[in-house]
C-alpha cells in the first residue's frame, strides 16, 4: 500500500511538472518569437538592400577576381570606388535632393487640391448618370488620404534622415560580408543536407541561385534604365521634379502590370496642374506609356534582361502585392512580386531538373508491377 | 618512447594533409602546388556510415567522389532487383567522374562498406571555377580528359579484342 501511495505521488508530481514545463515552454516560445520579431524588425530593409547591393556588385568583384586579385581585396576596391563616387557627388546631390524635396512638400497641397477638383467634376458627372453611387464620396476619401500622406511625409522626413544614416552604416557592412562569404554561407547550408540528398541539393542550389541572381540583377537594371529614360524625357519639357518623378517611375516599375500605371499618375498630374492641357502634357503621356513602357520595357528590356521563366500570372501579381502590403507596407508591395517570382524560379528549376533526369529506365519498377514486359 | 608523444613535434606529412592527398589523385595531377589550396576549398568532405547509399542507379549525376578512407561497393541492379557487385573501391580510388563534365543519370549504384570519408567534386563548383579561375579549371579538366581518354582507348582495344574473339568462334 505504501508503495502504491508513493507511485501515486510520483505520478502526480511528474504530471504536474510536465504540464508546468509545457506551459512554460509554450509561453516562452511565444515570447521568444515576439522578441525575435521585434529584434529583427529594423533589420529587414538593411538586409534586403545589402543583398541587392551584393547581387549588383558581384559580377564586378568576380571580374576583378579573374585578374588574380584576391576576393577580399577586390571587394575593398569596389567599395572604395563606390565611396569615392558618393563623396564627389554627395555634396551636390544632397543639397539638390533636399531643395527638391522641400519645394515638393510645399507644392504638394496645390497638386492634391487640383486633383480633388478634377475628381469632384468627374464625380458630379457620374452621379448625374448613376444616381445610386451618390452615397460614395470619392472626393472626400482622396482628400483625406492626401492630407494624411502629407502629414506623414512631414513627420517622417527628419526620422527617415536618421534611418538613412543607420542604413549607410549597416548596408555596406552587410553587403561586404554577403559578397565575401555568400558562397561559404550557401555551402554551409547545403552541407547540412543528409548524405543521400546532398548531391541533388548542391546542384539545385547552384542552378536556383544562378537564375535568381540573373533575375534580381535584370530587374534592378531594368528599373534603373526606365527611371533614367523617364527623367531625361521629362527634363525635355518644362515640368518640375523630373528626377524625382523618374525615380518614382523606376521604383514602381519593379511591380509588373500595376506599377507602371501608379508610376505615371504623379507625373501626369503635375504636368496637368503646372503646364495645363497642351502639347507638353501629351508628350509626357506619350513618354510614359509608349516610349518607356511599350517600346523600351516590353520590346527591348524585358526580352533581353529577364527570362520568361519569371513571368507571373496577373492574379498572382495582385495577390503578391496585397500580401506584401499587409506584411511590410509599401516596401512589401514593391518587393512582394520579386519574391513571388523568386519562388517560382526555384519551383521551375526543381521541376526542370527532375524532368531532365527522368529517364525511361528509372520508371521500370512501376511498369514491372503492372505487368509491363521488359523490352 | 611513449607513442602518445611520438608525432607531436613533427609537421604533418604530405599524405596526411588534404592537399597532399588530392595531389596524388589522377584527375588532379596537372594542378600546381599553389592550386591545391583552392582545390581544398572546392571539394566537399562527407562522412558516411557503413551500408550508406552514396547514389543509386538512375539518380541525377553531377560529380565525382574520391575515397579518402574506407571502402565503397559499386554494383548494378537487374530487372528483378538482384544486385550484381562490380567492384570494391579502396582509399585513393574515385568513381562517378564521367558525370563531372556532362550531366547524365548514374549508370551504377554505390554503397559504403564501412565508415568512409568521401571527397566530392561537383560540376557546379567546376563551372564556377571556370568563370573565376579559368587556369585552375583548365588544369582539372585536362587531367580529367587525359584519364577518360586513356580509359576510352583501353575500352576500344578491349572491344576490338572481344570482337575478334567472337569472330574466331563463329568461323
Image (tube, coloured by chain):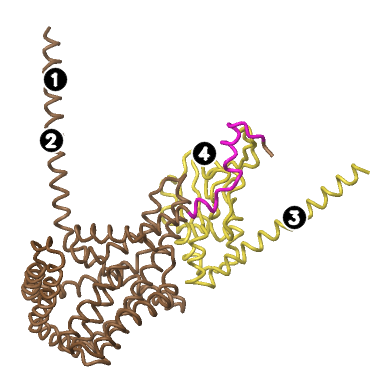
Chain colours: A brown, B yellow
Marks 4 and 1 sit apart, C-alpha to C-alpha, by 46 Å
Q: Is residue B121 above or below residue A105?
A: above
> Which of label 2 and label 3 is nearer to you?
2
Magenta stretch: residue B50 in it?
A: no
Residue under the point 53% across and 45% down: B55
Determine the residue located farthest toward the right in the rendered image.
Answer: B171
Q: Position of residue A228 (x, y in %)?
A: 31, 84
- Disc number at residue B114? 4
Residue under the point 19% across and 78% down: A266
Residue sitting nearer the eye, B38 or A108: A108
Marks 1 and 2 sit apart, C-alpha to C-alpha, by 20 Å
Chain hosting mark 2: A
Q: Position of residue A232 (x, y in %)?
A: 29, 88
Q: Tell me the element at label 1.
A: helix
Magenta stretch: residue A369 in it?
A: yes
Can residue A80 be seen by looking at this rendering? no
Residue sitting nearer the eye, A33 or B146: A33
Residue that numbered label 2 is attached to = A23
Residue that numbered label 3 is attached to = B154
Marks 4 and 3 sit apart, C-alpha to C-alpha, by 31 Å
Q: Earlier in the sequence, mark 4 or mark 3?
A: 4
Residues at circles 4 and 3 in contact by the CB criterion of under 8 Å: no
The residue segment tinted magenta is A352-373
Left or right? Give the position of B139 relative to A195: right
Left or right? Give the position of A53 relative to B157: left
> Which of label 1 and label 2 is nearer to you?
2
Q: Tell me the element at label 4.
A: loop
Chain hosting mark 1: A
Residue sitting nearer the eye, B22 or A165: A165
Residue that numbered label 1 is attached to = A10
Amino acid at each position: 500500500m505504501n508503495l502504491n501511495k508513493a507511485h501515486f505521488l510520483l505520478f502526480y508530481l511528474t504530471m504536474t511538472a510536465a504540464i508546468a514545463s509545457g506551459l512554460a515552454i509554450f509561453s516562452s516560445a511565444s515570447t521568444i518569437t515576439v522578441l525575435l520579431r521585434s529584434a529583427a524588425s529594423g533589420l529587414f530593409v538593411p538586409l534586403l538592400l545589402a543583398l541587392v547591393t551584393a547581387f549588383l556588385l558581384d559580377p564586378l568583384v568576380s571580374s576583378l577576381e579573374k585578374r588574380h586579385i584576391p576576393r577580399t581585396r577586390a571587394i575593398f576596391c569596389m567599395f572604395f570606388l563606390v565611396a569615392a563616387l558618393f563623396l564627389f557627388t554627395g555634396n551636390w546631390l544632397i543639397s539638390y535632393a533636399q531643395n527638391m524635396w522641400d519645394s515638393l512638400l510645399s507644392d504638394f497641397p496645390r497638386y492634391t487640391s487640383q486633383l480633388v477638383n478634377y475628381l469632384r467634376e468627374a464625380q458630379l458627372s457620374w452621379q448625374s448618370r448613376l444616381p445610386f453611387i451618390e452615397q460614395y464620396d470619392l472626393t472626400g476619401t482622396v482628400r483625406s488620404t492626401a492630407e494624411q500622406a502629407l502629414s506623414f511625409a512631414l513627420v517622417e522626413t527628419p526620422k527617415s534622415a536618421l534611418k538613412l544614416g543607420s542604413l549607410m552604416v549597416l548596408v555596406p557592412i552587410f553587403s561586404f560580408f554577403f559578397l565575401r562569404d555568400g558562397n561559404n554561407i550557401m555551402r554551409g547550408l547545403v552541407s547540412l543536407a543528409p548524405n543521400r540528398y546532398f548531391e541533388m541539393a548542391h546542384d539545385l542550389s547552384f542552378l536556383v541561385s544562378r537564375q535568381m541572381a540573373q533575375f534580381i540583377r535584370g530587374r534592378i537594371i531594368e528599373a534603373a534604365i526606365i527611371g533614367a529614360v523617364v527623367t531625361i524625357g521629362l527634363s525635355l519639357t518644362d515640368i518640375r521634379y523630373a528626377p524625382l518623378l523618374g525615380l518614382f517611375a523606376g521604383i514602381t516599375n519593379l511591380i509588373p502590370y500595376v506599377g507602371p500605371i501608379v508610376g505615371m499618375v504623379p507625373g501626369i498630374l503635375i504636368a496637368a496642374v503646372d503646364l495645363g492641357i497642351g502639347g507638353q502634357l501629351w508628350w509626357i503621356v506619350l513618354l510614359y506609356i509608349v516610349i518607356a513602357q511599350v517600346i523600351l520595357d516590353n520590346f527591348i528590356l524585358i526580352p533581353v534582361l529577364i527570362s520568361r521563366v519569371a513571368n507571373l500570372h496577373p492574379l498572382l501579381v495582385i495577390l503578391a502585392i496585397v500580401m506584401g502590403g499587409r506584411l511590410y507596407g509599401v516596401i512589401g508591395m514593391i518587393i512582394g512580386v520579386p519574391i513571388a517570382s523568386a519562388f517560382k524560379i526555384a519551383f521551375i528549376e526543381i521541376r526542370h531538373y527532375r524532368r531532365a533526369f527522368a529517364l525511361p529506365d528509372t520508371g521500370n519498377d512501376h511498369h514491372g508491377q503492372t505487368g509491363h514486359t521488359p523490352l | 618512447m611513449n607513442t602518445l608523444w611520438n608525432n607531436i613535434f613533427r609537421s604533418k606529412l604530405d599524405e596526411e594533409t588534404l592537399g597532399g592527398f588530392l595531389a596524388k589523385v589522377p584527375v588532379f595531377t596537372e594542378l600546381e602546388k599553389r592550386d591545391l589550396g583552392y582545390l581544398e576549398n572546392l571539394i566537399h568532405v562527407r562522412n558516411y556510415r557503413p551500408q550508406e547509399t552514396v547514389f543509386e542507379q538512375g539518380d541525377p549525376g553531377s560529380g565525382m567522389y574520391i575515397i579518402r578512407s574506407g571502402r565503397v561497393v559499386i554494383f548494378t541492379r537487374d530487372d528483378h532487383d538482384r544486385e550484381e557487385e562490380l567492384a570494391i573501391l579502396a582509399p585513393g580510388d574515385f568513381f562517378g567522374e564521367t558525370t563531372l563534365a556532362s550531366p547524365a543519370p548514374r549508370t551504377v549504384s554505390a554503397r559504403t562498406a564501412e565508415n568512409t570519408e568521401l571527397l566530392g567534386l561537383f560540376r557546379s563548383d567546376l563551372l564556377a571555377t571556370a568563370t573565376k579561375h579559368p587556369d585552375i579549371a583548365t588544369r582539372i579538366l585536362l587531367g580529367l580528359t587525359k584519364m577518360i581518354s586513356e580509359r576510352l582507348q583501353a575500352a576500344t582495344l578491349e572491344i576490338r579484342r572481344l570482337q575478334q574473339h567472337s569472330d574466331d568462334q563463329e568461323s
